[in-house]
Image (spheres, rainbow, N blue to C red):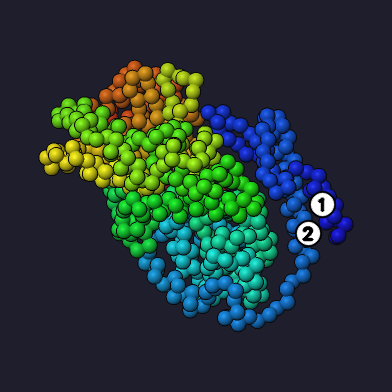
Amino acid sequence: MPDKIKKLESEIASLPSGYISKKNIKGSVKKYYQWTEDGKKKSKYLDDESAAELEIQIEKRRKLQKELRAIKKAVIKTPKTFTLPEHHFKTNLLRGELLRSFIEPIMDFQHRDCFRVVEDYLEHRNLGKVFILYGLRRTGKTTLIKQAIASLAQQDFEKTAFIQVKQGDTLGSVNYDLKWLLENGYKNVFIDEVTFAEDFIEGAALLSDIYAASGMKVILSGTDSLGFILSESEELYDRCIMLHTTFIPYREFESVLGISGIDEYIRYGGTMSLGGRHYNEAVTFKTKASTDEYIDSAIAKNIQHSLRFYQDGGHFRHLAELYDKNELTNAINRVVEDINHRFTIEVLTKDFVSHDLGISKRNLRKDRENPIDILDRIDQEALTNGLKNAMDILNKNEQSVQITDTHRIEIKEYLDLLDLTVDIPTEFIPVRNEKKYRTAIAQPGMRYSQAEALVRQLLLDEEFQNISIADRNYVLERILNEIKGRMMEDIILLETMMANPDKEVFRLQFAVGEFDMVIADPARATCEIYEIKHSTEMIPEQYKNLADSEKCESTEFRFGRITRKAVIYRGENRNDGDVYYLNVEDYLGTLRFCGDPRGTASAVRGD
């Protein structure tokens, strides 16, 4: 056996380590070989042929590593049985009546759709695999764990334990307690906030190779989403099932929390309540300060914590200088504010300008029934400065580290990995030789909170305060409705994309005019075309593009026969000739999410 181990170790050492990453740069996919050498992260560009050859070698190394782990595990001597008094556990461990008291408060809570995926893991044989439940803060992870424990039969509950990892705990402490649980016949162990253990990313394979391989069901959870993703690609490669909770679609917002209405979802959507109605309003996205706290703790610190402990900080790449200067949170704030429509290098480098304000100015000025130019007469410099200060956004000349296109790309990569952002494509007729995307935020309440910051600054403008209260209210309502309308478009496109992984969902832009959404089915050569309006009224003007025969003919030529024309709006379901009017809440309520390779609210990754 020792000779076999030495031979495998020698063969593994001769093969390349690391992995191949892909980056979408200006619509072109570039491949890079990334590895660690002398403690430093290195990267090399590859052409397609070299990448394919290297990928074969890396995959061979991983298979040999798996074989080596199996051999080593076979020769590991079983630790001696020992009895450990309750007060000698090294972690915060609950079992028995303490565990029952812990889960009691959630007994009446509604289940998220993804609850069935956790149940499947507990009910079926998954030898050698751990289950990872991960996502941003306040997206229901701990509640899912409690509900899973509560669903167990009594005999299984008696052999179930819950470990709450604290800052300062190590994987060694967790391992010490797991040994006792294994020796005493425990079948299910739930470990919450496991990424708080600073050595988790580098040592996570212990949980799958020893405990899960011995028949124990090990369910891990934590807010450090990036840490789990990094551990999956390294230590837990092919030995984990991953479920992501960050994306909370409208249907679950309504069914689980009992809060209905697209505008409510726009204002507070993105996190899960622990106690029902108004939790998000009170805690998460009610104020700019609470939104900033969430962005800082749930997103920026999530990224920073993972990168700090992954390969001893060697994966910070170009963001290290921002992190060292305490400006990474500022950069993320700046990206989030503008990410829905202008995720370009300008977002990070030009002096801050509110794009919400610019759009509202134009629309108010050209209103046919009641044109108002108040936004042209206010003190725009004072407004912009006030808004900038309110949102803690630094201008270029205030940054000690200049933000470059490289910084932007890397921030976007991590936001994508956290499932906070999703790119929505735009197609063109006539065809253009270019790729265009609009980036949507999966947590709408975060976006809307920043829009409200704009409204608060408007209220402080002297010129604005001199108009009548009726005009003030009208202008503010128009501004917020413009924002809600654009956000409603993004929500519908985002959820439709996730619910239709086998179809193409995009915006279609013509030389003049556009379809807000197209759902194309290449296999059947059919498509559906939609307009999206934040309105409760049926107005023929709303579907003028859908009724344009030239646009429809060119669309059918390129994407196939049109099987539906519809306007999604906030009114009742009805039709006007061959154009359907669909209520937005009803439309979103029909969408189901499964099979997304990144792991949506109802999708799971694993073998």
Residue 102, given in percent of the width and then of the height, sits at 45, 72
Q: Would you say 9 lies left or right of 554 here?
A: right
Estimate the x, y position of residue 322 in percent, counting from the top left: 52, 44
Label 2 sits on what residue type? Ile
- Distance CA(mark 1)–CA(mark 2): 10 Å
Establish if 568 lies above or below 432.
below
Q: Residues within 10 Å of mark 2 (few under 14, many from 20)?
A: some
Q: CB under 8 Å between callouts 1 and 2? A: yes
578 vs 133, nearest the viewer:
133
- For residue 155, the mark is none
**Is 110 in front, or is 340?**
340
Q: How many marks?
A: 2
Q: Residue at x 47, y 50 (%)?
A: 299
Q: Nearer the viewer, residue 144 or 164?
A: 164
Q: Is residue 497 visible?
A: no
Q: Position of residue 247 (x, y in %)?
A: 44, 49
**Circle 2 sits in a helix, a strand or a loop, which is it?**
helix
Classify residue 163 by image quadrant: bottom right
In the rendered structure, the answer to whether residue 405 lies left or right of residue 338 reads right
Q: Nearer the viewer, residue 547 or 207?
A: 207
Percent x, y of residue 152: 50, 69
Task: Determine the secondary structure under disc 1.
Answer: helix
**Of discs 1 and 2, which sits in the foreground?**
1
For the N terminus, give its image quadrant: bottom right
Residue at mark 1: 8
Q: Callout 1: 10 Å neighbours few (<14), some, many (20+)?
A: some
| Dot placed on the residue nearer the N-terminal end, 1 or 2 | 1
Q: Is residue 147 visible?
A: yes
Q: Which residue is mark 2?
A: 71
The residue at 77%/66% (across/down) is 76
